[in-house]
Image: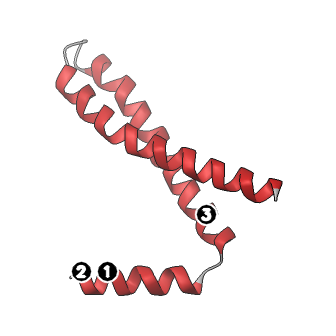
Amino acid sequence: MTTTVTGLVSSSLTQHSYDFLSTHIGLAVIILLAFVMLLRELVPIVRNGDAPLQVRGLDVAVLPLLIVFAIVVLARLADLLV
């Protein structure tokens, strides 16, 4: 399984351009981040304010997405400035 995934990722990275990859990965991260943030706000409303474990679980998902979002934005800005 690991060899297949590594080969698939490797071939995908070499076949597509930087703009294609950063645009599509950035778009996917933004959509996923917006969805998780929306869930983070809606879970306490549905649970009548008693959902700290679910909200903490969503916080765990938000942090890596924010980091990837920041990396994508910085990479795009660096590409524009160079």
Q: Position of residue 51 (x, y in %)?
A: 20, 20
Q: CA distance from mark 2 to mark 1?
A: 5 Å
Check whether the beta carbons of the residues at disc 2 and disc 1 lie within 8 A of each other.
yes
Residue type pointed to by label 2: Thr
Q: Nearer the viewer, residue 31 or 23?
A: 23
**On the rendered image, what quadrant is the N terminus found in?**
bottom left
Q: Earlier in the sequence, mark 1 or mark 3?
A: 1
Q: Residue furthest right?
A: 81
Q: Position of residue 64 (x, y in %)?
A: 39, 45
Q: Nearer the viewer, residue 23 or 73?
A: 73
Mark 1: give few (<14), some (14-19) or many (20+) Cα within 10 Å.
few
**On the rendered image, what quadrant is the C terminus found in?**
bottom right
Mark 2: give few (<14), some (14-19) or many (20+) Cα within 10 Å.
few
Residue type pointed to by label 3: Ser
Q: Nearer the viewer, residue 16 or 74?
A: 74
Taking 39 as reference, is 20 above or below it?
A: below
Taking 52 as reference, is 79 above or below it?
A: below
Q: Quadrant of residue 60 in the image?
A: top left
Residue 2's disc number: 2
Residue type pointed to by label 1: Val
Q: Residue furthest front?
A: 82
In the drawing, does residue 59 fall left or right of residue 21?
left
Q: Quadrant of residue 78 in the image?
A: bottom right
Callout 3: helix, strand or loop?
A: helix
Q: Nearer the viewer, residue 61 or 32?
A: 61
Mark 3: give few (<14), some (14-19) or many (20+) Cα within 10 Å.
some
Callout 1: helix, strand or loop?
A: helix
Residue 22's disc number: 3
Q: Which residue is mark 1?
A: 5
Q: Earlier in the sequence, mark 3 or mark 2?
A: 2
